[in-house]
Image (cartoon, rainbow, N blue to C red):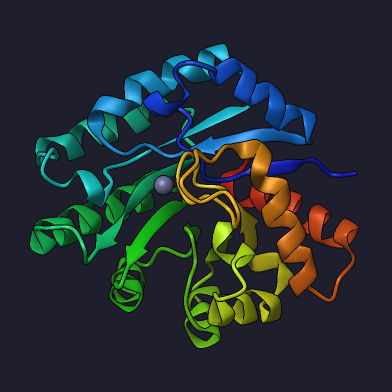
Amino acid sequence: MAALIDTHCHLNFTEFDDDRAEMLMRAHQVGVTHLVVPGVSKASWAQQRNFARHYQNWHNAFGLHPYFIAEHQHSDLEQLSIELGKGGAVAVGEIGLDATCEAMDKQRQLLQAQLQIAVDFDLPVILHHRKTLDEILKMVRDSGLTRGVVHAFSGSQQQAEAWVEQGFSLGVGGVITYTRARKTRAAIGALPLHALLLETDSPDMPTCGKQGQRNEPSYITRVFDALCSLRSESPEVVREALWQNSRRLFNLNC
Ligand SMILES: [Zn+2]
């Protein structure tokens, strides 16, 4: 049986400082063998590299997240290129636009520059969006990028199909465990299987029934089960496809 890959989890965050090794053990026990950890700010990158040296199959992406817009400086972009130049990164991320955060123009400038960096390094991107899905798609089209993932996809089937047409994958997370997320569940059920990736966004985005608690990669089985309930294919076929999709996008050596 194919293993599971959590393609989006912030395992370097302080929420895991007390039990990181045990948390990774729990993930391994339920079949999660590989993890993709997106960067959020310049300050996180060195720490991520350290963890990747200590823990097996911990894959890093590096980027400047819109949540931390106040922290980012223009010179961080140059540092990002230097960091990526060291090798070992599987993507540029987490990058994007968040309409609930401040400084939208600065967000746009940083996103545009990071999309170009991804093109230059021939890497996929991990995209964060909130009320900005269509604007980001336009910027991605302009950049010429054709590889990446829309993290925590929530939206209509029509929006999802536009991303798939651009060559992008859609990150399937805890959202689909909530039956009230009708539009997103319908879209995820109808999209081509080759466009889907599994993710938890740990420590955030708890699955249904775990609200208010820390999320962790071992709970990805709940997302997987919810996904299978929305798909016509067998769980084995879904699992194998998710494994192949993750390996292909991030060029994982597994
Ligand atoms: Zn994230």
231 or 142, which lies in front?
231
Say which quarter of the image contains residue 103.
bottom left
Q: Is residue 254 visible?
A: no
117 or 193, which lies in front?
193
**In x, y percent, where is residue 250?**
57, 45
Say which quarter of the image contains residue 100.
bottom left
Query: Residue at (79%, 65%) from the top-left corner?
Result: 228
251 or 201, which lies in front?
201
In this rendering, position of residue 71 left or right of residue 141: left
In this rendering, position of residue 90 left or right of residue 178: left
Q: Looking at the image, which residue sits at the far bottom? A: 158
**In x, y percent, where is residue 197?**
63, 57
The total number of labels drawn is: 0
Query: Residue at (61%, 38%) from the top-left corner?
Result: 217
Query: Residue at (67%, 55%) from the top-left corner?
Result: 223
Say which quarter of the image contains residue 81.
top left
Q: Is residue 151 visible?
A: yes
